[in-house]
Image (cartoon, rainbow, N blue to C red):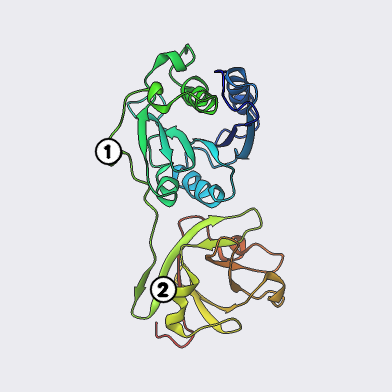
């Protein structure tokens, strides 16, 4: 450590991936980072993103980022590993994000105000010698995150990249169609609650409020009657409810039952919300 550096600072890396826990991948990445920066504190945000699901990883990262400490985010959902896709580090106002350039980081970078500097991770000095190209998380991205935590300047890690050339993160937007709100399921949590891409302010067009009925139209063409409530416990037995979830978006839920199971929904399923008197 350079003389005069803040030796009380404890660097954080917040780590998200689709690696799961059955294999050694997460533990090895931890070991690589701690070998570079022993003072590092690592927060495992989740490693249970569905394999190869870049959109799900990007959404999880957006949900989590506002609660993470300043420092480095390492996000790895990388179905293009070993191809020409880039590994990148992005400087934002309060830290850095490291991951593949496949849209995974893009929603979070945008939420944090956009990139200040972006580099492709091309400097082998800050990488491990790799026996093959299939574990860039261990060999390229985890080392980059640890070196940033140790105080290495981002420009040392590789060549500058024009932020305009980064892969976008495409998130679906709801739309108003003749007085009904057409959206989709962004995320199903482990309880089966279905987060929608619908801001509750959009329901103002229905003059709806807590306690009011809503029509929920499903991908199979059927419709269910739901009710807007404040909390899960406000739901009557077997009643479908619409509530504002902990991230400020509308969600479909039952009290102590899986909405996803009951309604046969998954991430990406189309859902329409309408006032109950709306014509079909």
- Does 108 sit left or right of 164 as displayed? right
Residue bearing the label numbered 2: 181
Q: Quadrant of residue 261?
A: bottom right
**Measured along the vertical axis of the image, is residue 41 above or below residue 200?**
above
Residue at image coords 38%, 17%: 123
Residue at image coords 45%, 47%: 108
Q: Is residue 179 visible?
A: yes
Which sits in the foreground, 108 or 241? 108
Check disc 1 and report its element: helix, strand or loop: helix
User: Where does residue 49 sit, x and y in percent of width and height?
Assistant: 55, 42
Q: Earlier in the sequence, mark 2 or mark 1?
A: 1
Q: How many C-alpha atoms fall within 10 Å of the one at disc 2: few (<14), some, or many (≥20)? A: many
Residue at image coords 40%, 44%: 106
Residue bearing the label numbered 1: 165
Q: Nearer the viewer, mark 2 or mark 1?
A: 1
- Does 256 sit left or right of 97 as displayed? right
């Amino acid at each position: 450590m350079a003389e005069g550096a803040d030796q009380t600072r404890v660097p954080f890396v917040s780590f998200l991936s689709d690696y799961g826990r059955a294999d050694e991948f997460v533990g090895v990445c931890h070991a690589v980072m701690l070998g570079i920066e022993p003072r590092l504190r690592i927060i495992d945000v989740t490693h249970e993103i569905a394999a190869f699901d870049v959109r799900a990883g990007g959404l999880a990262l957006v949900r989590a980022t506002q609660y993470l400490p300043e420092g480095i985010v390492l996000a790895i959902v990388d179905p293009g590993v070993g191809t020409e896709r880039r590994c990148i580090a992005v400087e934002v106002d309060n830290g850095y994000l490291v991951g593949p350039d496949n849209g995974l980081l893009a929603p979070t970078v945008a939420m944090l105000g956009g990139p200040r500097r972006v580099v492709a991770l091309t400097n082998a000095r800050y990488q491990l010698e790799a026996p093959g190209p299939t574990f860039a998380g261990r060999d390229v991205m985890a080392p980059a995150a640890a070196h940033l935590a140790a105080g290495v300047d981002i420009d040392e890690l590789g060549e500058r990249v024009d932020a305009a050339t980064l892969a976008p993160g495409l998130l679906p937007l709801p739309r108003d169609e003749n007085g009904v709100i057409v959206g989709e399921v962004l995320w199903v949590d482990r309880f089966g609650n279905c987060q929608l891409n619908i801001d509750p302010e959009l329901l103002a067009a229905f003059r709806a409020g807590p306690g009011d009925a809503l029509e929920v139209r499903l991908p199979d063409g059927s419709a269910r009657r739901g009710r807007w409530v404040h909390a899960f416990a406000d739901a009557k037995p077997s009643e479908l409810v619409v509530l504002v979830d902990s991230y400020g978006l509308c969600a479909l839920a039952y009290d102590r039952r899986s909405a996803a199971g009951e309604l046969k929904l998954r991430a990406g399923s189309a859902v329409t919300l309408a006032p109950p008197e709306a014509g079909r």
